[in-house]
Image (cartoon, rainbow, N blue to C red):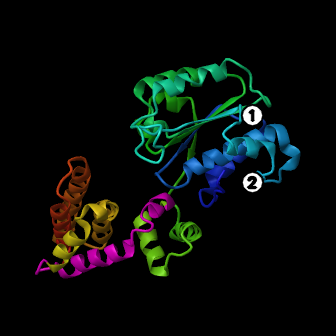
């Protein structure tokens, strides 16, 4: 198992730790909050700790850490722990696991748990199921899971990761205890980014923290794409308005080729939030202009990839929306 860092959201972590220590652990926990703030990592750390405490408590120190030399850690690392399951979106092509993922966690994956539930836990009185994210469940799969949440198999703990809990079936939410995760402070995001990208410059880290907006996962998503240079171009657009279209043309030429697809997508994703950040310091007509530009940027960014719009033309148009921020 790749080492994972626990930074931020101490109240949520402490709430689960207290429930574990009480000996009366609820069977289903909804770990909810913005995407990329560490919910999935925490769910896996918590699952490892729960399973290790059930069989190797004497080898553990206080906290969440489970030494790599324990049997529990070894089994999970090898994907062979009989009392642990993860449900995630699977690759569309099993022979190409690093490529596109399926749109949903399928009902077949949920039904696959039934054979596990038909027997008692193998190594202790506890088993743990992580679903990351439950938002990705097909509707039929959500209904199938609900049956297990309503009548939980003995000793089974469900850790359900959700980026949008309001969209879940109310009956699923009502069966779970909520652990609320919040965006991290900029200093915490920077700490994680530095650890994950040790070769990044200070300027790049600052840009990634801004782009992350409290989400280390989002910040790291932009890693290696020289987001600092794109931010500098966006700032120039917002400050000058680019009356000669020189910046727009340069960005369209830079991001238009197929080889630039990752940076092109990063630009489209970052531009609306960049406009929103600039809007915070505005009022009156300037604020209305910025809000209109933000709405148009979100619509353009959302449509560009799905509709396979011309990349160069799209970058030119998005750059024009950012340029509206310039004071006339």
* Residue 119 image offset from top left, x and y in percent: 71, 19
- Asked if the residues shown at circle 2 and circle 1 are in contact, with their CB atoms under 8 angstroms apart, the answer is no
Residue occupying image coordinates x 59% and y 69%: 195
Q: How crowded is mark 1: few (under 14 residues within 10 Å), some or many (20 or more)?
A: few
166 left or right of 48?
left
What element does badge 1 sit on? loop
Between discs 2 and 1, the one toward the N terminus: 1
Magenta range? 216-245
* Residue 129 image offset from top left, x and y in percent: 62, 34
Relative to residue 160, is residue 222 depicted above or below? below
Real-space Cα distance between discs 2 and 1? 21 Å
Residue 228 in sight from this viewpoint: yes
Magenta stretch: residue 234 in it? yes
Q: Nearer the viewer, residue 25 or 35?
A: 35
What element does badge 2 sit on? loop
The outermost residue toward the front is 95
Relative to residue 174, is residue 247 depicted above or below? below
Residue occupying image coordinates x 15% and y 63%: 313
Q: Which of 290 and 191 is in front in this view?
A: 191
Relative to residue 318, is residue 12 depicted above or below? above
Q: On the rendered image, what quadrant is the C terminus found in?
A: bottom left
Relative to residue 46, is residue 200 depicted above or below? below
Q: In which quarter of the image is residue 254?
A: bottom left
Name the main secondary structure of what is drawn in magenta. helix
* Residue 4 image offset from top left, x and y in percent: 64, 56
The residue labelled by disc 2 is 65
43 left or right of 109?
right
The outermost residue toward the top is 118
Residue 24 circle label = 1
Magenta stretch: residue 145 in it? no
Residue occupying image coordinates x 49% and y 40%: 133
How many numbered marks have been drawn onto this rendered protein structure?
2
């Amino acid at each position: 198992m790749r080492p994972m860092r626990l930074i931020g959201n101490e109240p949520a972590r402490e709430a689960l730790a207290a429930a574990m220590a009480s000996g009366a652990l609820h069977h289903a926990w909804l770990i909810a909050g913005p995407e990329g703030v560490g919910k999935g990592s925490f769910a896996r750390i918590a699952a490892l700790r729960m399973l290790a405490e059930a069989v190797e408590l004497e080898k553990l120190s206080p906290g969440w850490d489970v030494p790599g030399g324990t049997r529990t850690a070894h089994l999970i690392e090898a994907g062979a722990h009989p009392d642990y399951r993860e449900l995630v979106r699977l690759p569309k092509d099993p022979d190409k696991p690093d490529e596109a993922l399926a749109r949903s966690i399928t009902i077949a994956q949920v039904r696959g748990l039934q054979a596990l539930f038909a027997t008692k836990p193998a190594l202790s009185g506890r088993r743990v199921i992580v679903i990351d994210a439950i938002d990705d469940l097909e509707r039929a799969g959500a209904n199938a899971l609900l049956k297990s949440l309503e009548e939980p198999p003995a000793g089974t703990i469900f850790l359900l990761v959700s980026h949008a809990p309001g969209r879940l079936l109310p009956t699923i939410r009502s069966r779970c205890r909520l652990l609320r995760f919040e965006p991290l402070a900029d200093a915490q995001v920077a700490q994680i980014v530095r650890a994950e990208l040790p070769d990044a410059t200070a300027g790049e880290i600052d840009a990634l923290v801004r782009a992350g907006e409290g989400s280390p996962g989002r910040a790291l998503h932009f890693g290696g794409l020289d987001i600092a240079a794109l931010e500098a171009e966006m700032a120039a657009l917002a400050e000058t308005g680019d009356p000669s279209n020189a910046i727009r043309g340069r960005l369209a030429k830079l991001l238009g080729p197929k080889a630039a697809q990752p940076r092109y997508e990063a630009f489209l994703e970052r531009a609306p939030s960049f406009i929103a950040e600039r809007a915070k310091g505005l009022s009156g007509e300037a604020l209305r202009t910025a809000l209109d530009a933000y709405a148009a940027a979100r619509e353009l960014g959302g449509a560009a990839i799905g509709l396979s719009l011309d990349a160069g033309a799209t970058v030119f148009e998005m750059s024009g929306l950012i340029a509206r921020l310039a004071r006339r």
